[in-house]
Protein backbone atom coordinates (compact mmCIF):
# COMPACT_ATOMS: atom_id res chain seq x y z
CA UNK A 1 0.00 0.00 0.00
CA UNK A 2 1.02 3.64 -0.36
CA UNK A 3 0.27 6.53 2.00
CA UNK A 4 1.67 9.98 1.30
CA UNK A 5 4.11 8.48 -1.19
CA UNK A 6 5.44 5.87 1.26
CA UNK A 7 5.02 2.14 0.72
CA UNK A 8 4.22 -0.24 3.59
CA UNK A 9 2.92 -3.77 4.20
CA UNK A 10 -0.33 -4.50 6.03
CA UNK A 11 -1.18 -7.51 8.21
CA UNK A 12 -4.03 -8.58 5.89
CA UNK A 13 -5.04 -8.28 2.25
CA UNK A 14 -7.17 -5.13 2.00
CA UNK A 15 -7.94 -1.98 0.08
CA UNK A 16 -7.02 1.20 1.90
CA UNK A 17 -9.53 4.03 1.68
CA UNK A 18 -9.74 6.93 4.17
CA UNK A 19 -13.49 7.14 3.64
CA UNK A 20 -13.79 4.02 5.81
CA UNK A 21 -13.36 6.39 8.78
CA UNK A 22 -16.92 7.59 8.12
CA UNK A 23 -18.16 4.46 9.86
CA UNK A 24 -16.42 5.54 13.05
CA UNK A 25 -17.60 9.15 12.74
CA UNK A 26 -21.23 8.03 12.53
CA UNK A 27 -20.84 5.20 15.05
CA UNK A 28 -22.07 2.68 12.50
CA UNK A 29 -21.01 -0.88 11.94
CA UNK A 30 -20.69 -2.41 8.45
CA UNK A 31 -24.09 -3.66 7.34
CA UNK A 32 -25.22 -6.99 5.89
CA UNK A 33 -25.96 -7.48 2.22
CA UNK A 34 -28.56 -10.12 1.34
CA UNK A 35 -29.73 -11.33 -2.09
CA UNK A 36 -33.01 -9.73 -3.18
CA UNK A 37 -35.91 -12.18 -3.22
CA UNK A 38 -38.08 -10.50 -5.87
CA UNK A 39 -38.19 -11.30 -9.60
CA UNK A 40 -39.28 -8.94 -12.37
CA UNK A 41 -40.53 -9.61 -15.88
CA UNK A 42 -41.54 -6.48 -17.80
CA UNK A 43 -42.01 -5.05 -21.27
CA UNK A 44 -40.51 -1.69 -22.24
CA UNK A 45 -43.60 -0.64 -24.18
CA UNK A 46 -45.53 -0.40 -20.89
CA UNK A 47 -43.05 2.18 -19.57
CA UNK A 48 -42.76 4.97 -22.17
CA UNK A 49 -41.02 7.19 -19.59
CA UNK A 50 -38.05 4.83 -19.72
CA UNK A 51 -36.31 2.23 -17.63
CA UNK A 52 -33.17 2.74 -15.56
CA UNK A 53 -31.01 -0.30 -14.79
CA UNK A 54 -28.06 -0.62 -12.46
CA UNK A 55 -26.35 -3.36 -10.50
CA UNK A 56 -26.55 -2.98 -6.77
CA UNK A 57 -23.17 -2.57 -5.09
CA UNK A 58 -22.58 -2.29 -1.37
CA UNK A 59 -22.93 1.24 -0.07
CA UNK A 60 -19.91 2.90 1.54
CA UNK A 61 -22.23 4.40 4.14
CA UNK A 62 -25.75 3.20 4.82
CA UNK A 63 -28.06 4.71 7.42
CA UNK A 64 -31.07 2.39 6.96
CA UNK A 65 -31.60 -0.22 9.66
CA UNK A 66 -32.66 -3.05 7.32
CA UNK A 67 -30.21 -5.16 5.34
CA UNK A 68 -29.05 -3.95 1.94
CA UNK A 69 -30.18 -6.08 -1.02
CA UNK A 70 -27.98 -7.28 -3.87
CA UNK A 71 -29.22 -7.84 -7.42
CA UNK A 72 -30.36 -5.46 -10.14
CA UNK A 73 -32.12 -2.22 -9.21
CA UNK A 74 -34.82 -1.02 -11.61
CA UNK A 75 -36.65 2.27 -12.02
CA UNK A 76 -39.48 2.06 -14.56
CA UNK A 77 -41.41 5.23 -15.49
CA UNK A 78 -44.86 5.48 -17.03
CA UNK A 79 -44.09 9.09 -18.07
CA UNK A 80 -41.63 11.94 -17.51
CA UNK A 81 -43.58 13.73 -14.79
CA UNK A 82 -44.24 11.03 -12.19
CA UNK A 83 -41.90 9.10 -9.88
CA UNK A 84 -41.02 5.59 -11.03
CA UNK A 85 -43.80 3.01 -10.91
CA UNK A 86 -41.17 0.37 -10.15
CA UNK A 87 -38.35 1.23 -7.73
CA UNK A 88 -36.93 -2.01 -6.31
CA UNK A 89 -33.96 -4.37 -6.33
CA UNK A 90 -34.55 -7.80 -7.90
CA UNK A 91 -32.59 -11.04 -7.93
CA UNK A 92 -33.79 -11.83 -11.46
CA UNK A 93 -34.82 -9.35 -14.15
CA UNK A 94 -36.24 -10.07 -17.61
CA UNK A 95 -37.02 -7.20 -19.96
CA UNK A 96 -38.76 -8.00 -23.26
CA UNK A 97 -37.80 -11.65 -22.75
CA UNK A 98 -34.10 -10.83 -22.26
CA UNK A 99 -32.62 -11.94 -18.93
CA UNK A 100 -30.12 -9.62 -17.23
CA UNK A 101 -27.23 -11.07 -15.22
CA UNK A 102 -26.52 -9.03 -12.06
CA UNK A 103 -22.77 -9.74 -12.21
CA UNK A 104 -22.50 -8.51 -15.81
CA UNK A 105 -24.45 -5.34 -14.99
CA UNK A 106 -22.48 -4.58 -11.80
CA UNK A 107 -19.19 -5.10 -13.59
CA UNK A 108 -20.24 -2.95 -16.56
CA UNK A 109 -21.19 -0.11 -14.19
CA UNK A 110 -17.68 -0.13 -12.72
CA UNK A 111 -16.07 -0.50 -16.15
CA UNK A 112 -17.90 2.50 -17.58
CA UNK A 113 -16.77 4.66 -14.64
CA UNK A 114 -13.07 4.09 -15.39
CA UNK A 115 -11.52 6.42 -17.97
CA UNK A 116 -8.94 3.88 -19.16
CA UNK A 117 -11.65 1.38 -20.19
CA UNK A 118 -13.65 3.87 -22.28
CA UNK A 119 -14.57 2.23 -25.61
CA UNK A 120 -12.59 -0.88 -24.72
CA UNK A 121 -15.37 -2.91 -23.09
CA UNK A 122 -16.77 -4.97 -25.96
CA UNK A 123 -19.14 -7.80 -26.75
CA UNK A 124 -16.59 -10.55 -27.40
CA UNK A 125 -17.44 -14.12 -28.37
CA UNK A 126 -15.16 -17.13 -28.62
CA UNK A 127 -14.52 -17.87 -32.33
CA UNK A 128 -14.46 -21.62 -31.58
CA UNK A 129 -17.54 -22.32 -29.40
CA UNK A 130 -19.27 -18.90 -29.88
CA UNK A 131 -19.83 -18.45 -26.12
CA UNK A 132 -20.05 -14.81 -24.98
CA UNK A 133 -16.80 -13.90 -23.25
CA UNK A 134 -16.80 -12.26 -19.81
CA UNK A 135 -13.47 -11.13 -18.38
CA UNK A 136 -13.28 -11.54 -14.61
CA UNK A 137 -10.94 -10.48 -11.82
CA UNK A 138 -8.18 -8.01 -12.70
CA UNK A 139 -8.75 -8.69 -16.42
CA UNK A 140 -12.23 -7.16 -16.16
CA UNK A 141 -10.59 -3.77 -15.53
CA UNK A 142 -7.38 -4.13 -17.53
CA UNK A 143 -7.63 -3.98 -21.33
CA UNK A 144 -5.64 -6.86 -22.85
CA UNK A 145 -4.94 -8.46 -26.25
CA UNK A 146 -5.32 -12.18 -25.51
CA UNK A 147 -8.66 -13.53 -24.25
CA UNK A 148 -9.22 -17.13 -23.10
CA UNK A 149 -12.66 -18.72 -23.41
CA UNK A 150 -13.94 -20.03 -20.06
CA UNK A 151 -15.75 -22.90 -21.80
CA UNK A 152 -13.35 -24.36 -24.39
CA UNK A 153 -10.11 -22.58 -23.36
CA UNK A 154 -9.51 -21.21 -26.87
CA UNK A 155 -7.25 -18.15 -26.88
CA UNK A 156 -8.39 -15.37 -29.20
CA UNK A 157 -8.18 -11.65 -29.94
CA UNK A 158 -11.09 -9.34 -30.50
CA UNK A 159 -11.55 -7.34 -33.68
CA UNK A 160 -12.32 -3.66 -33.80
CA UNK A 161 -10.83 -0.28 -33.18
CA UNK A 162 -8.73 -1.24 -30.14
CA UNK A 163 -6.14 -3.98 -29.86
CA UNK A 164 -6.55 -4.22 -26.07
CA UNK A 165 -10.12 -4.82 -24.92
CA UNK A 166 -12.26 -6.24 -22.11
CA UNK A 167 -15.08 -8.70 -22.79
CA UNK A 168 -18.51 -8.20 -21.23
CA UNK A 169 -21.68 -9.70 -22.82
CA UNK A 170 -23.75 -6.95 -21.13
CA UNK A 171 -22.77 -4.73 -24.09
CA UNK A 172 -24.71 -7.01 -26.48
CA UNK A 173 -27.62 -7.48 -24.07
CA UNK A 174 -28.14 -3.75 -23.50
CA UNK A 175 -27.81 -3.07 -27.24
CA UNK A 176 -30.60 -5.59 -27.87
CA UNK A 177 -32.78 -3.81 -25.30
CA UNK A 178 -31.96 -0.44 -26.86
CA UNK A 179 -33.26 -1.72 -30.22
CA UNK A 180 -36.67 -2.30 -28.61
CA UNK A 181 -36.65 0.88 -26.53
CA UNK A 182 -39.18 3.67 -27.08
CA UNK A 183 -36.44 6.21 -26.21
CA UNK A 184 -32.77 6.54 -27.06
CA UNK A 185 -30.56 5.23 -24.24
CA UNK A 186 -28.89 7.87 -22.08
CA UNK A 187 -25.11 8.02 -22.17
CA UNK A 188 -23.53 9.53 -19.07
CA UNK A 189 -20.01 10.80 -19.77
CA UNK A 190 -17.75 10.94 -16.73
CA UNK A 191 -15.66 13.74 -18.32
CA UNK A 192 -12.55 12.07 -16.91
CA UNK A 193 -9.41 12.02 -19.03
CA UNK A 194 -8.56 8.56 -20.38
CA UNK A 195 -5.18 7.10 -19.54
CA UNK A 196 -2.79 6.19 -22.31
CA UNK A 197 -2.42 2.44 -22.81
Image (tube, rainbow, N blue to C red):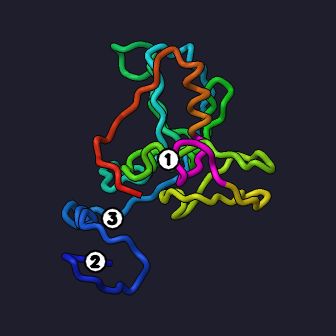
Q: Nearer the viewer, residue 4 or 15?
A: 4
Q: Nearer the viewer, residue 65 or 111?
A: 111
Q: Could you tell me which residue is drawn at 55 percent across and 39 percent down? A: 90
Residue 125 vs residue 73: left or right?
right
Q: Nearer the viewer, residue 125 or 21?
A: 125
Across and down, in percent, residue 156 comes to 69, 55
Residue 150 vs residue 57: left or right?
right
Q: Is residue 160 magenta?
A: yes
Q: Which residue is mark 1?
A: 120
* Residue 127 in sight from this viewpoint: yes
Identify the element where label 2 is drawn: strand
Q: Which residue is mark 2?
A: 2
The quadrant the C terminus occupies is bottom left
* Residue 39 in sight from this viewpoint: no
Q: Which tag is nearer the camera, tag 3 or tag 2?
A: 2
Q: Which secondary structure type mostly characterizes the magenta part of the structure?
A: loop
Across and down, in percent, residue 195 comes to 35, 55
The quadrant the N terminus occupies is bottom left
Across and down, in percent, residue 9 comes to 34, 86
- Rounded to the nearest angstrom, the CA distance separating label 2 from label 1 is 28 Å
Quick check: 21 above or below 165?
Answer: below
Number of the label disc, if any, that sits on residue 27: none
Query: What residue range appears in magenta?
Result: 157-170
Q: Could you tell me which residue is drawn at 47 percent across and 16 percent down? A: 183
Amino acid sequence: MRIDGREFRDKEVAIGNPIAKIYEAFGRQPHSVVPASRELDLEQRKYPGGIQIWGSNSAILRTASKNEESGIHIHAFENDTKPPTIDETFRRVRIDGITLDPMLIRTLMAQTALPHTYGRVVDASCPECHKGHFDTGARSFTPHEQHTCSRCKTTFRTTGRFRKTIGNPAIRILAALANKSLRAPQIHDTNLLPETL
